[in-house]
Image (tube, grey):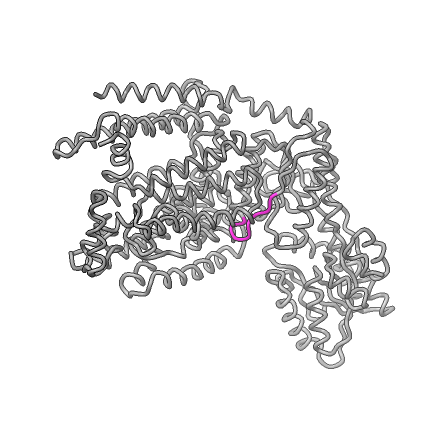
């Protein structure tokens, strides 16, 4: 009786052995061979390029996704552009990257949801022969990242610091100038980079006494804005105004890391009935560009997503042709395991004077500058 | 009896099998085949199967615990937060106190047990509904995660990553496959054969009807064929990969919990409590203890799932665990459990979870965006449960109903349900 069972099992097993044998991905360690070949000699021009982006929480990511879809198509690639879901973001992005690897993507561009939680997937991609480009956010603690492309955030800070000094000099010919400092959320690595960049310009002036921080709060922990939230910046500005700037003391400038916080600071100052100081910003948000044109906010930073995407696609094209993509920084960006070769785009400072020129190519912002 | 009827009876309806579960297995097979065609064979490729298992093993582990919670008539909304909390605690003790990874796992499980005892205490001994206790737990432990982690992402050491991202080592001769995975597959095949053989022997000893030989053959050949196929696929992945370690952990848990819920008195008590708590208590079931243990067990499994996810992600982050409870609950309900408690099986929940997983994975392979994936998953969840409800209303075969019957005997019978039960008992033999 058991014979039938055994025979049945054996027959099934043999049939499936034959079936499954065809799809084995082993055959003598060719995975490593193909990955090295991939970077040396390029790959077919119609290969699949994967792009994994965070959840659609900001305009910037939605714009980037559209630009990637169209740009890769124009360049002749097949593209797979994915956003993480809104609730299970990290797990979604991990699964999406795995799916891209399975589909045989040659290059995977990743705008990380959480930069430290992708190393397993990135390494799997690497072993499958794909090249990994970290887009805008550096992927940490893994050997698997090949390139990093982003705007130079230290430079952003420097430009903000310089703009603050220039703006104050324009309003008041001689110092000392009184300023206050704001920085971003402490859980965001970029916050410190912006702040350090700005301080590299401001610190010498503070030391020489040309610039005075009214409240004396110069430590990044004191100046931090939790979660990059406008309400927190506004609350801090309110209390600074009551504690330090009561009576006829004036405030000449405020270093703000981005536009949302800049507007919150201006709202706070207006509420207290004080003249609006020179306030910096970043991101070229629509409301802030309006504010700059109206003469309230002094400056913002233009980090055009179009250029960043264009640069990334250029890297993909170079890889396809078998060339080494151009990088301009091979020592600043250490992800904890290795220094990732980076291409850093220069940010552009925008004030009322150069706004029309800076946003000439931007369909949303250009009309505001007229 | 015609052969078709006989097949229906002994393959799907009879003995301990669960027809809804078989329905779901067919759905699973259909979905797999559909995506296999739509993705040009990528779905069943070794690389994809391996990532599928490692991506969803932690959700399936949660589904095991959730099944027991739901069967007992409760719900646990805190699992994601508990997982995240344990994840950050474990990552922290390894980073700040240089605890080696194995003791760290034990610490994690202990923290899970402690949290479970806390929630179980409120549910079982104070009598606060589990929905409220775990809703509170969801906020409590999410806050705890942020408090300890400062919303930072904390990396974990290499050894710890094994439980989430690890594979079996390559040993023995070069067969073109991962040898340990082959061995694992062999063990499963042998287990399938032995189980069927022992089942037949038991039925003979008990003078029960023994299914015809050819039915047994089908019951062995189909699973064995599937296992052999899966084994070869998993073993045939890229060199250095195999059946994932997290999948093995899941497999062991499924076997253990499957046995406990099916074959032990303690396990049956959970069903009794969920079917009719009052009746169960009167028949001597220690109601409070069962509720306490079920809630506690859930948090321990959540702790394990959290650690596996952290291991797979190589770091514990502030967004870990968000939405997991809902994935686990969905898997349990798609797998045939009843909202009112008292029925559902571990294997059903696993199949339910796999249906959702394959759906997710297949759609991702096709490049469908996560927005549409969520919509489709929502529709599938609704349809899976609605179909069963509809069948029941139409008086057709309904698993939920046929499984409810044993518990109705315990219940203080209302006339309506007595009549209903009487009518339906004619249609098919009362299940086990």
Where is residue A244? Give x, y as percent: 69, 75
Where is residue B105? Give x, y as percent: 39, 45
B158 with respect to A363 (left or right): left
Farthest bottom residue? Answer: A247
The residue positioned 27% from the left and 63% from the top of the image is: B125
Residue B297 visible? The answer is: no
Where is residue B288? Give x, y as percent: 24, 59
Residue B376 visible? The answer is: yes
Tell which of B430 and B353 is nearer to you: B430
The residue positioned 61% from the left and 27% from the top of the image is: A35
**In the picture, residue A297 is in which quadrant?**
bottom right
Q: What residue span does the magenta drawing correspond to? A: A82-89
Quadrant of the snapshot with the C terminus of chain A: bottom right
Tell which of A158 and B413 is nearer to you: B413
The residue positioned 78% from the left and 67% from the top of the image is: A278
B195 with respect to B250 (left or right): left
């Amino acid at each position: 009786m058991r014979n039938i069972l055994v025979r049945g099992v054996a027959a099934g097993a043999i049939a499936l052995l034959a079936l499954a044998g065809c799809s084995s991905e082993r055959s003598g360690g060719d995975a490593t061979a193909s990955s090295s070949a991939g970077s040396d000699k390029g790959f077919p021009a119609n290969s699949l390029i994967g792009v994994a982006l965070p959840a659609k929480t900001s305009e910037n990511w939605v714009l980037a996704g559209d630009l990637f879809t169209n740009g890769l198509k124009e360049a002749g690639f097949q593209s797979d552009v994915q956003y993480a879901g809104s609730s299970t973001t990290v797990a979604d992005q991990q699964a999406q990257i795995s799916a891209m690897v399975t589909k045989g993507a040659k290059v995977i561009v990743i705008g990380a949801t959480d930069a430290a939680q992708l190393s397993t997937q990135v390494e799997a991609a690497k072993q499958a022969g794909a090249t990994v480009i970290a887009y805008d956010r550096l992927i940490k603690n893994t050997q698997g990242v090949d390139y990093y492309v982003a705007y130079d955030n230290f430079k952003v800070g420097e430009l903000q610091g310089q703009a603050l000094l220039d703006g104050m000099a324009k309003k008041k010919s001689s110092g000392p100038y009184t300023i206050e400092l704001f920085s971003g959320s402490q859980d965001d690595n970029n916050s410190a980079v912006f702040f350090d960049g700005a301080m590299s310009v401001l610190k010498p002036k503070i030391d020489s006494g040309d610039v005075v921080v009214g409240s004396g709060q110069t430590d990044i922990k004191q100046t931090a804005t939790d979660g990059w939230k406008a309400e927190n910046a506004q609350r801090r500005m309110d209390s600074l105004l009551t504690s330090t700037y009561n009576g006829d003391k004036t405030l000449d400038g405020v270093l703000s890391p981005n536009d949302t916080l800049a507007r919150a600071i201006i709202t706070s100052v207006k509420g207290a009935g004080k003249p609006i100081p020179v306030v910096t910003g970043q991101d070229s948000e629509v409301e802030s560009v309006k504010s700059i044109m109206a003469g309230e906010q002094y400056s913002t930073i233009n980090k055009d997503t179009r250029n960043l995407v264009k640069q990334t696609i250029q890297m993909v094209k170079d890889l396809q042709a078998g060339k080494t993509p151009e990088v301009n920084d091979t020592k600043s960006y250490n992800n904890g395991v290795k220094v990732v070769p980076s291409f850093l785009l220069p940010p552009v400072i925008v004030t009322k004077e150069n706004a029309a020129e800076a946003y000439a190519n931007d369909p949303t912002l250009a009309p505001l500058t007229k | 009896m015609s052969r078709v009827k006989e097949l229906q009876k002994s393959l799907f309806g009879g003995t301990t099998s669960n027809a809804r579960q078989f329905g779901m297995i067919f759905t699973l097979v259909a979905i797999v085949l559909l995506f296999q065609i739509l993705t040009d064979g990528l779905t069943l490729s070794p690389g994809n199967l391996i990532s599928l298992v490692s991506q969803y093993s932690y959700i399936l582990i949660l589904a095991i615990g959730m099944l027991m919670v739901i069967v007992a008539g409760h719900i646990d909304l805190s699992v994601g937060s508990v997982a995240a909390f344990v994840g950050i605690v474990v990552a922290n003790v390894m980073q700040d106190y240089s605890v080696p990874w194995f003791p760290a796992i034990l610490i994690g499980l202990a923290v899970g047990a402690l949290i479970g005892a806390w929630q179980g205490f409120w549910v079982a001994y104070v009598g606060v509904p589990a929905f409220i206790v775990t809703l509170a737990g969801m906020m409590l432990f999410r806050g705890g995660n942020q408090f300890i982690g400062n919303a930072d992402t904390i990396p974990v050491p290499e050894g710890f990553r094994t439980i989430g991202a690890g594979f079996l080592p390559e040993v023995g001769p070069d067969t073109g496959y991962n040898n340990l995975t082959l061995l694992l597959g062999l063990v499963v095949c042998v287990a399938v054969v032995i189980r069927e053989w022992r089942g037949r022997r038991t039925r003979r000893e008990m003078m029960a009807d023994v299914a015809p030989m050819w039915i047994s053959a089908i019951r062995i050949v189909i699973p064995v064929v599937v296992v052999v196929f899966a084994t070869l696929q998993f073993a045939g992945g890229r060199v250095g990969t195999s059946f994932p370690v997290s999948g093995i952990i899941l497999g062991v848990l499924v076997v253990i919990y499957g046995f406990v819920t099916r074959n032990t008195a303690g396990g049956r008590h959970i069903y009794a409590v969920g079917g009719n708590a009052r009746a169960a208590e009167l028949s001597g079931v220690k109601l409070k203890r069962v509720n306490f243990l079920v809630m506690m067990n859930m948090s321990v499994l959540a702790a394990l799932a959290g650690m596996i996810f952290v291991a797979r992600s190589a770091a514990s982050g502030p967004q870990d665990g968000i939405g997991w409870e809902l994935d686990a609950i969905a898997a349990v309900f798609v797998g045939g459990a009843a909202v009112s408690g008292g029925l559902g099986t571990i294997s059903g929940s696993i199949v339910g979870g796999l249906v959702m997983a394959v759906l997710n994975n297949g759609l991702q392979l096709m490049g469908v965006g996560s927005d549409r994936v969520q919509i489709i998953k929502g529709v599938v969840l609704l349809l899976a449960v609605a179909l069963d409800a509809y069948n029941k209303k139409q008086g057709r075969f309904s698993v939920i109903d046929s499984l409810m019957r044993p518990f109705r005997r315990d219940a203080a019978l209302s006339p309506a349900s007595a009549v209903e039960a009487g009518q339906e008992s004619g249609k098919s033999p009362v299940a086990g």
